[in-house]
Image (cartoon, helix red, strand yellow):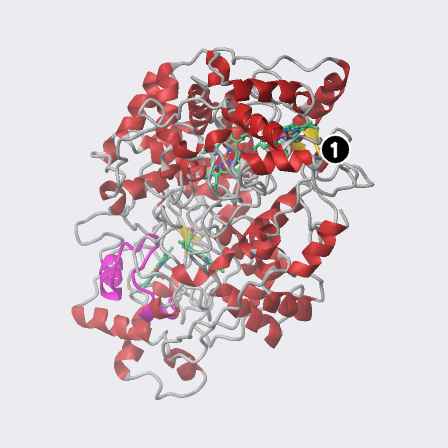
Amino acid sequence: MGSFNKAEQKAPILFLIISVVVTAVATMATVTFAMGDKPPATASKVSLTSMPAAGPTQPQVKSFAKVANPEIPPLAPLGPPPIPADNPMSDAKVALGKLLYFDPRLGGDASISCSTCHEPEQGWSFAEGISRGYPGTVHWRGSQPVLNSAYYNKLFAVGSTPSLESQAPSAARGGVAGNGENDIMEARLRLIPDYVNRFNDVFGEPWPTINNAWKAIAAFERTLVQRDTPLDKYLLGDKTALDDQQLRGKALYEGKARCILCHNGAFTTNEKYYNIGVPRATRWEEDGLAQVTFRFEQYAKGTTEEMYRNIKDDAGLYYRNKNKWSMGKFRVPSLRYTKYTAPFMRQGQFYTLEEVIDFYDRGGFDEEGRTTSFPETKTPLIQKLGLSDEEKEDLLFFIEALSGDEILMDKPKLPPYKPLFSQAELQTAQAAK
Amino acid sequence: MVAIVTTRHCFLAVTLGVSLAIAGQAVAAPEIGPLPVLKVNEARAELGKRLFFDKRVSGDVGISCATCHEPENGYANKDALSKGYPGNKHFRNAPGLINTAHKKVWMHDGRIGTNLNDVTREMITEDYIMNMDMRIMQERFKQDPLYVEMFKAAGLGEPSNGGVRKAIPEYLKTLTSRGAPFDKGTMSASAKRGMKLFKGKAGCVACHNGPVFTDGNAYNTGVKENFDVWLDPQRHQAFIAYAAFMGIKNYMNLKRDPGAHLQKHAADGSDMGRFITPSLRELKYTAPYMHNGMSKTLADVVAFYNRGGDNDRNKNARIKPLKLGKTEQQDLVVFLLALSGEPLTGSKHVWLKAYPTEYPVIANWLNVPN
């Protein structure tokens, strides 16, 4: 019978519903501001007072980290990921989660699994700017790496879900992602005897349930972490783990290049939201299928009709709080494992880390001078850096030290379906009718 | 399956089913006879036709309505049990759609008693049928210049899911029987004898009556289960999803199709296995028969009735051995065949033109409104 997504949505009614949602969401706005740039007193002027020691007046600060600023947690070795109390880890659960992660039966037409868009060989993400979609569609954002995602407090480019447990269903169900309905996916699991046994073993319930499937996948994802990068080793005392060039890069990262302002702490992100000037993905101008999804996303995210008609870029955090000041802001991603996760940014606007560094060096502009579609909300923290070619290279090598060896995994052999009843059982039931 | 909207329609179907059942007992069977003429909005029907054969109506663009409802098979399908959305199969027979616009209750279990707009939505959104998020469908069609034109010509504005659900039912109205010997008055002597049996000794008309040959009520006629529903996990999974959504108790252990049980959920299960009386028109094209395709030919169907159906303690009292002779059985079959008209397989009913293989880019995208 379809989900709510698939249920009736006459256009005029839709926009009515939206206005209700908007008011409801608007109440979240104040909370959300605490997550990144604060709204200015007036929309045109951006105040820097709440920002750490950075800005046009102090471009020469040597190291933000050294300026004892409690708002900027220093780089640190990565600890184990947090494990929620209601989903403890166990080997059996992780093993089950691994199977499910690779099992296309957890998707609408049983043709794509989580791993299809989060491929181990593609940095546990998908190596195109905009991810592939559910068959017949294309996505509208780049697939993010699942590796290390256990450390985020909120998932997705705009932090729309709070946990891996609640992220998995939105991935499996979204119309341009898995497009699978809970009931059919759950029914499939129940007809795979190996899963029935495993779920029973892990969760102690007679039948597999879809919620337990998400829990198992989340547990598996929490094992996909990397904590032994050169930087981790260095910070844990192995002074040979970074070479001189990387150390120069580290100093730039923490100083002149300003990366530490946002990409800080053990996980190299403050998990706040900024508009750093990334320009619109050009694919939307060139690809009809991408245009279809672009409009669908506006519709699905409950924008106003006016916005649906006029918007031409991903408005980012705005979709969550419907506040103008959030237009074009995105979550600061971790820079760990980026050696393997190109392309970069929410729609893969840049193919290499070199391009990313050049982008920052220009103060948030690409090679052709393009920048954000929402200049009003661009953060003042992004400034021209004036890095020399050498410095850029140093920085690049340091960023690469945030990745260890590539983590690969063979696809497991998936357990087969089996009929639940035998011919004899069915005959007995028929005779007893 | 968590659609609140659909649940509502189930309730509507329930109300309708019940009131019809009562009416059915009080009044004499409505005469069998020709079908009324339906007024059709041509532009909308044309649009509906293009949609009916368009795979972009399904989630992964793998199937169209016509994948299961094939024109050459009376808009039914040769498979006993229907195909499903890729990755799934269905647990029931795909019914023929000719004359469906003349019905008041739809689906084998009668769960929709409102209109074809709702049936169309169900077909499009159901996970094991077309699994389509209609918001994506709508945006797909806005990206097809011919649809943009056709929706406008049909008075439906820009492509929308609401418009799709108006246009397809309009097209379904064009799928109306024409030229059946029964309607033209050209039945053979054998068919006429069969008609007499149908109305008399064989008692068929008690349920198969009115111009569509159905009273719209549900009965248990004692049709055997089709074990493939359970022996093929891809069917069983759809069945489980369906039974769970319909709130059928003990659905994991269920080994029979509950049918219209979902209307009243009788605690003792005495309403298990009731199915809506199907139309008997166009059967020439729509074999196999019954909700689960268990009868391969019309001769099988008649033999089934002649032996008083198969075992089921809930079987309707009307279904009992008929003691028809060989010729009588044949005459009945010949009569049933005289209810079939010309096939609706020409361009008037079938969209024969090719569909675009990709979505053209909207040029100047930045400067035109979405």
Q: Residue at x 43, y 87 (%)?
A: A237
Question: Where residue B173 sits: x, y (%)?
Answer: 46, 19
Q: In the figure, is residue A302 to the left or right of A307?
A: right
Q: Which residue is mark 1?
A: B320
A337 drawn magenta: yes
Q: How many marks?
A: 1
Q: Quadrant of the N terminus of chain B?
A: top right
Q: Residue at x 62, y 59 (%)?
A: A190
Examine the rendering and report whether any part of residue B338 can be seen. Answer: yes
Q: Quadrant of the C terminus of chain B?
A: top left
Instruction: Please tell me which residue lies in front, A185 or A273.
Output: A185
Q: Residue at x 29, y 32 (%)?
A: B144
Q: Amino acid at mark 1?
A: Lys
**Relative to A15, residue A164 above or below:** below
Magenta residues (range) = A335-361
Instruction: Please tell me which residue lies in front, A73 or B57.
Output: B57
Helix, strand or loop at disc 1? Answer: loop
Q: In the figure, is residue A381 to the left or right of A394?
A: right
